[in-house]
Image: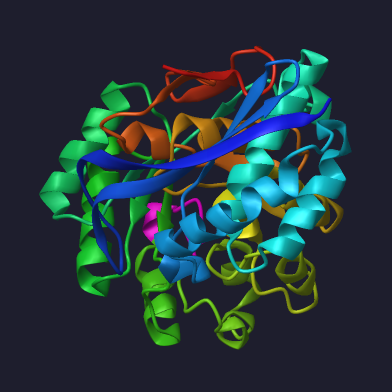
């Protein structure tokens, strides 16, 4: 089944409200869409959401890579040779994982449509549904408590709280959230590299009564030695996010002493579904839990991450709320969300379509 047409374009998508993390406040995001069409008239959709701070790939880098590589890589190729195609994409786009992810996701969408099956079933679905957390950005304690209450009223049962700008404010905010919601709702936190080694240990000690589920990326991405110096009990509850960009990182982090007990897999960091499943396989073999995360992204790539997550035995958590932050999207379908539980639509491929 030959590829006969490819195109890509950029959408500037405003958020429903400003969103602050340890190093930046976002009001809109740039998503790069890819559409790949076959001789049968079927098309697959993909999206890239570059993050310069995390991977070094700017929106300009993503667009210019797609401009220069898309047609030469794909036109005339057979989609059934998908593994060969994604490997060639990695060779041609070594420094732009979001651009690679856009192509990889579109190819996987097409493969599902070719076989007339949901992608998760082709990959080997092992989960039927999974609960997502929803994220509270950095804000005042009172605002965070109000937002937590709103999310619980909407049916979510797992909260993720951004921290990392001020240790004192972080601890105060988390104590007030826990006091408001009680002990039954899991809280996970994400520092986005915002703490020093000493601050992280202080944070651990002062939040012990809160029974936090786990902590994402407390230290700088390259401070692996700092993580290895932490007590094992701390490392087991720490997730690698910005430190984990590819399967090579995943393999390295299995060596003793393991710096992380959890891996956060994001398609935009590693380059798509194919490399994400390589990380997932390493995690499964090493008995390391996975959380599947995201940037602020279209339903297209959120659905892609969900299909992949449902196909990995190592999946324990997901934080796939990125499309919920968008004031608009250009597609529909992909997944159903009810009381915080995500399920796929069981349509072929990713189950998404342009509006």
For the image shown, how many numbered marks are present on the structure? 0
Say if 64 sits above or below 157 in the image. Answer: below
User: Which image quarter holds the C terminus?
Assistant: top left
Task: Give the image location of residue 118, x and y in percent.
Answer: 72, 19
Task: Give the image location of residue 13, x and y in percent.
Answer: 30, 40
Residue at the image position 77 percent from the left and 27 percent from the top: 111
Q: Is residue 98 visible?
A: no
Residue at the image position 64 percent from the left and 44 percent from the top: 103
Region in magenta: 209-216
In reply to whether residue 11 is colored magenta, the answer given is no
Q: Is residue 53 left or right of residue 308?
A: left
Depth order, front residue of 62/52: 62
Say if 198 sits above or below 184 in the image. Answer: below
Say if 79 sits above or below 208 in the image. Answer: above
Task: Give the image location of residue 298, x and y in percent.
Answer: 44, 35
Task: Give the image location of residue 39, x and y in percent.
Answer: 75, 21
Say if 78 sits above or below 284 in the image. Answer: above
């Amino acid at each position: 089944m030959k590829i006969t047409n490819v195109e890509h374009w950029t959408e500037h998508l405003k958020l429903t409200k400003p969103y602050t993390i340890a190093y930046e406040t976002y009001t809109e995001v740039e998503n790069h869409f890819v559409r790949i069409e076959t001789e049968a008239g079927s098309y697959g959709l993909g999206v890239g959401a570059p993050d310069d701070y995390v991977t070094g790939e700017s929106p300009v880098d993503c667009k210019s890579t797609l401009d220069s590589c898309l047609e030469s890589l794909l036109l005339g190729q057979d989609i059934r040779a998908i593994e060969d195609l994604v490997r060639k994409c990695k060779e041609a786009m070594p420094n732009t994982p979001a651009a690679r992810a856009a192509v990889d996701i579109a190819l996987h969408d097409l493969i599902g449509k070719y076989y007339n099956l949901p992608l998760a079933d082709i990959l080997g679905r092992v989960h039927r549904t999974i609960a997502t957390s929803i994220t509270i950005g950095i804000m005042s304690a009172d605002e965070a408590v109000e937002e937590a209450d709103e999310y619980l009223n909407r049916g979510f049962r797992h909260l993720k709280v951004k921290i990392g700008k001020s240790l004192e404010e972080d601890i105060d905010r988390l104590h007030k959230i826990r006091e408001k919601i009680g002990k039954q709702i899991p809280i996970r936190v994400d520092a986005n590299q915002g703490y020093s080694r000493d601050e992280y240990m202080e944070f651990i000690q002062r939040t012990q009564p809160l029974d936090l589920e786990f902590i994402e990326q407390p230290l700088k991405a390259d401070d692996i030695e700092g993580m290895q110096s932490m007590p094992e009990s701390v490392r087991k509850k720490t997730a690698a996010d910005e430190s984990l960009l590819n399967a090579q990182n995943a393999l390295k982090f299995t060596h003793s002493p393991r710096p992380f007990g959890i891996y956060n897999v994001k398609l935009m960091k590693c380059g798509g579904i194919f490399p994400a499943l390589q990380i997932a396989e390493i995690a499964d073999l090493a008995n390391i839990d996975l959380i599947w995360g995201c940037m602020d992204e279209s339903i297209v790539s959120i659905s892609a991450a969900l299909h992949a997550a449902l196909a990995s035995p190592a999946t324990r958590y997901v934080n796939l709320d990125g499309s919920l932050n968008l004031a608009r999207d250009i597609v529909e379908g992909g997944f159903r969300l009810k009381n915080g539980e995500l399920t796929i639509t069981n349509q072929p491929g990713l189950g998404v379509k342009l509006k």
